[in-house]
Amino acid sequence: MTYLKQGLSELNHLRHLVLLDGNSRRMWTEEQLKYYATHLGPGGRADDWLFDPFLFMNSKSGSGRDYVAEVNLGQTGSVEGNFAGVCSPNPADKSDWSELLGFYFGENGALPTLDRAIQKLSGQLPPPDHRRNVVLSLPYPHITQERFGRIEAAGNVLNFSVRRQDLTRATNSRLEAEKWMVDEIVELWSKARYGHLNLLGLHWVFETVCMSWEVDDHRLLEGLRKHINARKLKFIWIPSSTAYNIHLLDNYEMYYFDAAFLRPNLLFREEGNKIETVAEVARKCNAGIGMEYFLEPDESIAVGKERHLRFREYLNAGVKCGYMTESACAHYQSLPSFERMYLNEDPVEREFYGDIYKFVEGKYKLKTLPPIPANSFFVPKRKAVIALDLGGTNLRMAVVDDAGKIVHWSQDRTPVSSQGIVDLTAEEVGEGIKLAGSNGFVVTGIGMSTGGRVNFKNGTIEDSTSAIAGWKNIHIKQILEERFGIPAVVDNDGNCSAIAEKTFGKAKSADNFISVVLGTGIGGGIYVDGKLLRAKNNYTAEIGHISVDPDGPRCSCGGYGCIELYASGAGLVRWAEEESKLTAIVGIDGEHSSKAISEASTPDNPAAIELLRKAGGKLGAAVAGLVNIFNPSMIVFSGSLVNLGAPYFDSFRETLLNRGMKPTVDDVEILFSDFPQEVGIMGAAALAFQISADREF
Ligand code: BMX
Ligand code: ZN
């Protein structure tokens, strides 16, 4: 295979695309666009054509709602691969999408402005050999958008989420909105009759292709691409080339896009990919290369120096790996770096301006450069915390930045002894601090989420069930603070899940809700009147230990017939065994796990479906009691068992509605977490930020 070749006729001679990231409040001007359309000689006179196509994008509407979704690196069971697509809590709606059309087509919009600029420049230069191409970025249909708006006056208000509907309907609504946007663009384009422009295609801004129980971007993109291609337009993608989407690239042309460019990300992240490796991948999958230049107006000298070294690698690798002449390239330019380079007093910046032009011409020559220093200045110091999540099965550690993003994540099996847990915890925290430091973060707190009865005031684990055997009388806060000299905090995992939902998740605006974590055991956290219920010792909301059968088996908490013995991960397996149905459900060679039980729950396995229905029903009965007591507005599920599927959750809902008191249960919303695997981590991180907030650095 080869790179995506330069000058292909099916892409209307595409060679060096430029990405122009705009802003509804600050429109592109003819003067600014001149810097991208042409190369300027001394005195500001255009002496040659430069970039083509022009890709226009915009990430926020005038009222601050998001067109773009963020990508949160880290592992999660909620989507395929080791990434999570995090949708904005403030997603754009139809009125914002219409505003975006105005940003492109309006009187002072990007397109008429570009058309006028090219018209003027064509008077100064020999006209270009083809019309300048334009690519427009489509907004992402956030799955957090429940009221997008109506496409037809008499139609429904589109809902992109799986709240109150199934995934097929959610995906259809998202596709309908995107198709509408494409058709609006096509219509506005044909009306506008620009004299110097050609609409080459549309751009997909989200960098991964997500698939989970609440999002199906595979089907969305397949449908959308067909729609776009039927209008004789190309569908273009410029993802960052990281592990989380690499498997999608092998076949990107077959499923999703007509052209893709891989961005090495070396300019923005210390641990960015080696450009040579990215070039090799691009060559294998017939993709182009993303070039990344960026000049912040107020950067420090040290940052500038390092940026120069990093820029140079992109240019040099273009010669060494051949992509300068062999591959189509997409140049990322934040507004308006290129102009800043040309006008800069620093000769180094002006040299880069000249070198980029030579690169586009295919005539740039290798310049040697010293290696990028290991102790990087590039990323300014930002605050981060170390968050730990200890459960019956796994110990997880994450570095979480001050925007609530997981920047690093690792996972080990929970050790069998309490000393083993303490040692591994300390080792992981040390590792996290090191990693955070080398990525330019300063660690301001350590937070831990754990099963068990936790004394929140002095940070001691007082007692545990057999889920974490021997995990009692451990002064974990003290141990960590003495070892690392950083403030630490510890709380029960159910409480942490509730704090995570309240801080970052579905319960942000709820004052009364119950968070249920379905894992090896069942944990919970309860908010009443805007406050987490901590009561006398913080031993609250042990939902897993509500007895649903006083004559049932003994539980390691001391009770009998606790709901955890039936409806948790471990409970499902135990119950199936008790009823001698486990082999019938998972098969002779099947794994003895809740995952295997859930995977077996197909229509031809009534035993599996029956077990899951019974378990969901028992949980529904237990939670009905809680609803009668606490009168919540929502119940939010998280944990590894959120994928158990319809038999479990439908039966949960039915029982809750049948058993709970009226009208208390009638309008309780049943929701799934936006980050079902990370609630412990996110809650621990929120607590760690709370205790570190006052520290000086
Ligand atoms: C157990 C109990 C709870 C915990 C719940 C879920 C211990 C060690 N654990 O009921 O405190 O909230 O498990 O925890 O006493 P997980 O391990 O299943 O995630
Ligand atoms: Zn119990």
Image: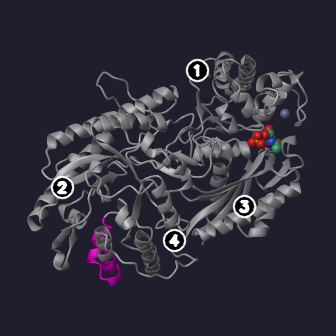
Q: Quadrant of ligand 2?
A: top right
104 is within the stretch colored magenta: no
Q: Secondary structure at mark 4?
A: loop
Disc 4: CA contacts within 10 A as few (<14), some (14-19) or many (>=20): some
Q: How far is disc 1 from disc 3 in space, using C-alphas?
A: 41 Å
Which disc, if any, is residue 488? Answer: 3
Q: Amino acid at mark 1?
A: Asp
Identify which residue is drawn at 29% across, 78% down. 344
According to the image, label 1 marks what residue? 666
Q: Earlier in the sequence, mark 3 or mark 4?
A: 4
Q: Are marks 2 and 3 in contact (CB under 8 Å)?
A: no
Q: Amino acid at mark 2?
A: His
Identify which residue is drawn at 78% across, 29% down. 572
Location of residue 525 by image quarter: top right
Q: How far is disc 4 from disc 2 in space, using C-alphas?
A: 43 Å
Identify which residue is drawn at 45% across, 39% down. 255
Q: Which residues are magenta?
A: 336-353
According to the image, label 4 marks what residue? 380
Q: Secondary structure at mark 1?
A: loop
- Looking at the picture, does residue 399 appear above or below residue 438? above
According to the image, label 2 marks what residue? 130
- Looking at the picture, does residue 466 appear above or below residue 458? above
Q: Position of residue 426 (x, y in %)?
A: 78, 63
Q: Earlier in the sequence, mark 4 or mark 2?
A: 2
Q: Earlier in the sequence, mark 4 or mark 1?
A: 4
Name the foreground residue: 653 vs 598.
598
Q: Position of residue 68 (x, y in %)?
A: 41, 48
